[in-house]
Image (tube, grey):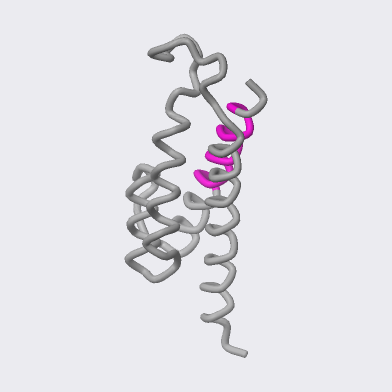
Amino acid sequence: MIIKESICLAAAICESITKIVCRQESLCGEHRGFKHRCDTLHGNGAISQETSAELKWLWDFRQNEHIFLAPEWEYGFYKMTECNRAIKALRSLKAELHDWYIEDLPF
């Protein structure tokens, strides 16, 4: 369950980052979904296609967050490879958005 929680936490951080950036930059409406925000950020050159795809994978993978909605027994389902992939997606998002903001600075 620690691995699952790490994956869900990485997804929650990515969700918050995309929501804040899209709102701050007026890229999409307040109630647009996570995948739409990924597409919008990619379309505006803020993140790569690969990062967008990895973020969407992370979002789909974390959708089993609610234990009572889980379609199957989860013990042993979550592996460190998925946790590492989730952290890598978060780091890619952070790095690419950092580069995107730096590119737009006037100095």
Asked if residue 14 is among those painted magenta in the image, a careful observer would answer yes
The quarter of the rendered structure image containing the C terminus is bottom right
Q: Is residue 78 above or below residue 106?
A: above
Which residue: 50% across, 23% down?
Answer: 65
**Image x and y of residue 81, in percent:** 56, 39
Asked if residue 7 is among those painted magenta in the image, a careful observer would answer yes
**Image x and y of residue 45, in percent:** 39, 71
Which residue: 55% across, 59% down?
Answer: 92
Give left or right: position of 80 versus 100. right
| Foreground of the two, 94 or 72 | 72
**Image x and y of residue 14, in percent:** 53, 47
Q: Which residues are magenta?
A: 4-16
Figure disc tally: 0
Give left or right: position of 6 versus 67. right
Q: Is residue 99 above or below residue 40?
A: below
Tell me the chief SS of the magenta region: helix
Give left or right: position of 46 versus 80. left
Which residue: 36% across, 42% down?
Answer: 33
Which residue: 53% across, 65% down?
Answer: 97
Q: Is residue 86 above or below residue 80?
A: below
